[in-house]
Amino acid sequence: MSVSQKDAIKNLFPKSRILSGVYAVYQYLQHQAHPEKDACLDRIIQNFEPDLTKQERQKRKLSVLYHRYYYQVQYHEYFLFHFQNLNHKGKKEFIGEYERAKICHTLVNDENSEKKQIFRNKYQTFQIFGKYYHREVLLLTPKTDDALFFSFVKRHEQAILKPFDGYSGKGISKICFSEIPDLRAYFSDLIKKGNYVIEEIIQQAEEMAAFHPASVNTIRLATYYTGSEVIYLFCCLRMGAGQSVVDNAGSGGIGAAVDIQTGIVCTAGMNKNGETYLFHPDTNQKIIGFRVPDWENLLALAGEAAKIVPEIPYIAWDFAYMPGGWCMIEANNSGQFGNQYRENKGFRPLVEKYFHPAKSTNHDKR
């Protein structure tokens, strides 16, 4: 990466601690005047540090707000990254969610911005990468012929329903068609609410199902395509927990880092609340040391897929393992850097090494 490209990444980082401090104090006073604003932050502090005194809690609140504006981290990231124990140099190694979003935005120039839609629309993702899905997927909109829906129902007893532009597992549900008394009314009501994709149930292999049979447990593998080489950035094993049918961290799932070189899980499992597990809490299945099956073929599959839309260099892929091999769940062009807290290691050196901000092809017409 050139010096100018590195500077483009670094320029996204805030410059003024003083302004961040002033804004943090302002927000703190706003929170004091409007307690309803405090509910989320209070809940997170209580979750991570339940034994703080009232005075300590107020100091922690001000610290979290300051870090939110200067280091661009979400409230829970402050604790997941252990910012209360790090100096400025250590904190700068981590990339918070707000900064990550800005960085990912710089990777695609305006001329190629429409390519992002491929990854925001689950059905468009399927249309481009369908050969890797190995299952039936149907788009449901007000324009969908109900005959297509009923034909799908005849072939499948159950299905997974997803909002076509959803994220973090939000709004995903498992449907058993035999439990719906009036399928025609169900279909009619559904398409009035919005656009969805409905997918054939994935039959995952036993070694992956063992962690949490109620959900499809997946591998998140992030790649960066330079135009000549695919870089494998990070990987994690994602597992559902409790009654959830999805494995996303935002929906209560558990994640553990996977070593790129070996395909072996190298950390304990961790959820978004910072709780760690050597064994899955529901099944007692050992997490650390698990060897991801058919690892080399998974790398080859992700490497091949990464070249299909070269205008989008950074993609986080989700794959499930079936008895016949790997299948794609979906792809995300702005995938979270969740392994930072799983590995307790910031990704700034990785990002500054590989991420190249896009150069616009617009010309100044003055």
Image: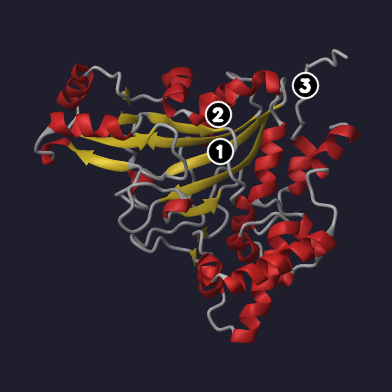
Q: Please, what secondary structure does the residue beneath circle 3 have?
A: loop
Q: From mark 1 to mark 2, how far is it between C-alphas?
A: 8 Å
Q: Furthest-top residue in view?
A: 365
- Mark 3 residue crowding within 10 angstroms, few (<14) / some (14–19) / many (20+): few
Q: Nearer the viewer, residue 347 or 33?
A: 33
Q: Amino acid at mark 1?
A: Leu
Q: Residues within 10 Å of mark 2 (few under 14, many from 20)?
A: many
Q: Decide if residue 154 is on the left or right side of residue 17.
A: left
Q: Residue furthest front?
A: 33
The mark closer to the camera, 1 or 3, is 3
Q: Amino acid at mark 2?
A: Ala
Residues tagged 2 and 3 counted as in contact (Cβ below 8 A):
no
* Labelled disc at residue 302: 2
In the displayed structure, would residue 188 be above or below residue 83? Answer: above
User: Percent position (x, y) of residue 120?
Assistant: 51, 30
**Which x, y percent locates residue 246?**
37, 46
| Whether residue 200 can be seen here | no
User: Residue sitting at 66 percent across and 71 percent down?
Assistant: 29
Q: Earlier in the sequence, mark 1 or mark 2?
A: 1
Lower position in the chain sequence, tag 2 or tag 3: 2
Tell me the tag on residue 221: 1
Q: Which residue is mark 3?
A: 360
Q: Residues within 10 Å of mark 1 (few under 14, many from 20)?
A: many
